[in-house]
Amino acid sequence: MDHKIIRTWRGWTTIENAPIYESMLVNEVFPEVKKKGVTGLEKVSISTKHHKNEVEFYLVLQFDTLNSVKLFAGNDYETAYIPENAKRILLRYDTTAQHYELRKELIFQKSNQ
């Protein structure tokens, strides 16, 4: 059985460019990925951490299989996928992405008490 794959990556931008980059991810980058036929991309989580002079972005992508990761990023799938327009507003970024097999997912519902 194939396990779902979690792909993580980090990039940093200026405080001023953080909203622009976030909007780019939501409205351009990932919609384009889906349009290109990467149907195995199931979920993208975008998290940020504010530092003194910059904002760190931590992306967690969930794919249905490793083959879908390769469809997204190519056979050299550990290399980070960063579109040129995104590179222009990032201060720096990880050049590789990390990959993990999703083993379990525990989801807890809020109680109404």
Image (cartoon, rainbow, N blue to C red):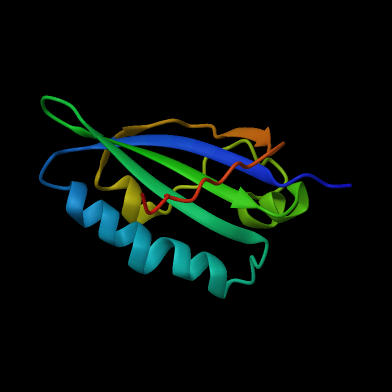
> Which residue is pictured at 29% across the width and 39% down the height?
48
Please provide percent x and percent y for residue 66.
Answer: 75, 47
**Front one among 95 and 67:** 67
Please provide percent x and percent y for residue 39.
Answer: 66, 68
Above or below for 68 versus 4? below
Name the quadrant containing residue 77: top right
Please provide percent x and percent y for residue 49.
Answer: 26, 33
Name the quadrant containing residue 47: top left
Q: Residue furthest right?
A: 1
Name the quadrant containing residue 72: bottom right
Q: Residue furthest bottom?
A: 35
Above or below for 87 versus 36? above
> Which residue is pictured at 63% across the width and 42% down the height?
105
> Which residue is pictured at 35% across the width and 36% down the height?
11
> Which residue is pictured at 55% across the width and 69% down the height?
34
Q: Is residue 109 left or right of residue 28?
A: right
Please provide percent x and percent y for residue 58.
Answer: 39, 37
**Front one among 86 and 27:** 27
